[in-house]
Image (tube, grey):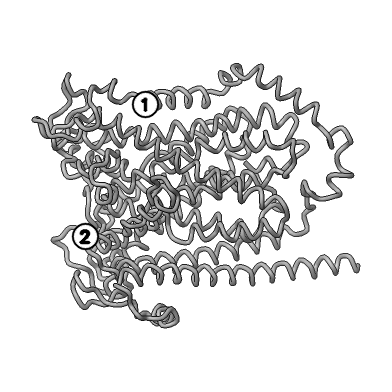
Amino acid sequence: MKLMAFRSYKKNWQFLLNIITAFVISISILFIGILFCYGFFIPMSGGSDITFWEYLCNFFTGNWGTTTIIIPGTPVTEYFSDSLYRMIEFLWFPILIGIIIGISLGRASFKLRGKWANKMPQLFFVLGLSIPVFFIGMMLRYNAVVGVENPSVLMLLFGRLPPSGYKNMMYPDPPFITGFPILDARLSGQILMAIDRIEHLILPILTLTPAIIAFVAWRTRSSMEKKLTEKSILSNTMKTMMIIGFIFSFYILVDLTFNLRGIGDIIRDGIFLGEEYLIIGGVFIFLIISVIMTFISSIVYSFVRFLKFDKREVPKINSPSFQNNEINPKEQNPGNNFRGSLRSYLKNFPIYLYKYPFVFLGLIVVSVLLVFAIFPDLISGYTRAELLMAYPGSWNPPSPGHPMGQTVLGGDVFALVLYGTREALIFGLKAVLIGIVGGLVFGSISSLHRYVNKTIETLMILLFIIPVILFLMLICIYSGLNFWIASITGFTLDAPTLIMGCLLIPIFTRAITSIPLRKRNYLISLKKILIYLPLAIGLIIPIYESLGFIGFLGMIYGSIINWGDQIHIAGGQLYDAAWASFWPGFFILITAFAFILLHYGLKNAFLDKWNSSMLIDNYPQIKEF
């Protein structure tokens, strides 16, 4: 009876402690986010003498400043009000469907692990994570316009839908009742106005929903591979903020692609025009929503832990009882078996590659991309300097001399795509190198003690306070940051590369932390780095190209050959010269798809054939990948 009473007391106390921790974490995130905004506000406002505490009071009282260029004198909160309602009205459906289907798909993939049937969910993960939302959005817009003149199965589905905008300009705004335009139009009896608003949201929803489903399913599968006892309120917070950050990043790109005039579009205009109060106001909105959603997620997590508290806990790898009592002496020192398995694995490595098609296909495509990146001048016949010159044939269609068509200056799209491959892979490798170095440092330190691990996890949360696209947009404001980085490090390192490299540190840190810091485990750590290296490259290249699509890379670097920047330039000629947008977007898709597919193939090949037979039985924490 005393034992049961003690367990009940511990269970209730743990639940209360998790609630308190969730509240403290949420308040801390909000405070740090405001501090981050204050750090940007001072230089943008020309060195304002406002103190941080005054800035904090203004935040909570809604005094976020007024516009100076766009409709001068308008309070920022009033300027964002309509866009905020439209954003919520647009996002609730993709997020709801994405969470329901994503969690179900992730759970199904986990139950099918190790079977051939699991390759279909994995292919969906790879495809959903690889496709840039702005590329899919532009192709849907193209089909919506061209489908009226050239009917086909796909074009008949989308040819009747509005290609862009959030409403038909012939309709006025509905009377304010709830603030949500579609609901207000329905409540006021203006059915046609409500239908028009819904029709304008169909293509954006079709663009955003698959990306959210794939990302949620991927994170659900990854989370289910970890035991409940290996999770914490901190790891749940970091996972939630990562998901929220990517959803908001997807939303900003969809907003800009379809010209929905939402918060993402307003922030971009604020950055281009120097409206510092609009920029910070947009960050405030995303910050508040992120904190609220993170707190709700932490409450749900605490409740789930409360319900599953009585389940038997599996001892951790570094617990004395596990090391001394639950494995036999042979398993405690598997050195000879380790070396024997390694020799056997290396001997049969070519066979394993052919047995796992993801590895085989991924390596083929990556090899082709590497050839394109190394020899673009030999393959295309253009040097980089020649490619930036003007030629006759502006926006000419594909021809024998230009198999992918020409650009606004008559440049060869095929040559631009090849040089864009070099730029993308160089960026990816530089950012991943930063992530690996940071992961090795923090991962090795985290392996020393669980309290050190908790501290490192807390620091990693700071990287996801601001959505990644928005964070990169803000960093791009400071053109002098590139020179500062170059002077400190001693070599050229632009700000986007440094920021993306830092955002990759948690991936490699968590990969290395799960391996005990022992001499015989160095090869395991190296193997896990090799597994996650292609995943990191596949995830960050579309994000980097998104900056080009928004127009920031061309603004910062001028004459840059970047897939996203090519799409940005050709976006105005989407319906007349679709080839100039299609081929760069297609190469973004193929590059990300190949690297992420290679990650899943290496993960299946290494863990199923090597670790599952020897290491996972001895080191269960390795399964979290």
Residue bearing mark 1: 374
Q: Please identify the quarter of the rendering in which residue 281 is found.
A: bottom left
The N terminus, quarter of image: bottom right
Mark 1 residue element: helix
**Residue found at x 34% / y 62%:** 87
**Residue found at x 33% / y 51%:** 253
Label 2 Cα crowd, 10 Å radius (few <14 / some 14-19 / many 20+): few
Q: Amino acid at mark 2?
A: Leu
Mark 2 residue element: helix
Locate residue 501, reporting x and y percent: 47, 47
**Residue found at x 69% / y 48%:** 227
Report, in whole angstroms, how far the alpha carbon at label 2 lies from the one at label 1: 56 Å
Q: Which mark is residue 345?
A: none
Q: Is residue 3 above or below residue 382?
A: below
Q: Which mark is residue 192?
A: 2
Q: Is residue 183 above or below residue 584?
A: below
